[in-house]
Amino acid sequence: MPRGYIASETSIHFMNYHFVWCPKYRRKVLVNKIAKRLEELIHEKAGDLSCNVISLSIQPDHTHLFIRAHPRISPNSLIGQIKGYTSRILRQEFPELKRKLPTLWTRSYFVSTHGHVSNKMIQKYIEEQRGR
């Protein structure tokens, strides 16, 4: 199996996503203790979802997350759970966020997949399935 791919009982996969999302009105609220806590919460939720954070960059007005996930969780579900969890906890722990914003995150996000599969790799997989 090629390096980086993960084999489970029913699949071989390499699902890496790059997400970008912003606070409501693109307010610059992701700073200092809030940014540090956001980082902790993202890692915590990723672990709960059996995902691996590859890299994370928190800017004052947006967040970049590069994450590896299992194919059983859709990108929409993954980011929805991360945004929901982080919003709930951050707004509890930092009440000033409630005063500044009606909701912490915008409803939108950017997502892109990363990685590639060659034709040769697909052919090899199909050949290995013969006789199963």
Image (tube, rainbow, N blue to C red):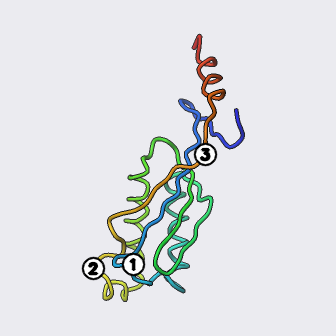
Q: In x, y percent, where is residue 10?
A: 53, 30
Name the image quarter holding residue 129: top right
Does the residue at mark 2 contact the one at mark 1 (Cβ under 8 Å)? no
- At 43% from the left and 54% from the top, the residue drawn is 78
Q: Nearer the viewer, residue 52 or 75?
A: 75
On the image, numbered disc 3 is attached to which residue?
A: 115
**First-in-chain label (2 vs 3):** 2
Q: Given the image, on which type of amino acid does mark 2 rest?
A: Pro
Select label 2 or label 1 by which is in front: 1
Q: In x, y percent, where is residue 103?
A: 31, 76
SS state under label 2 = loop
For residue 52, side relative to residue 77 (left or right): right
Q: Is residue 12 above or below residue 63?
A: above
Q: Given the image, on which type of amino acid does mark 3 rest?
A: Gly
Name the image quarter holding residue 5: top right
Does the residue at mark 3 contact the one at mark 1 (Cβ under 8 Å)? no
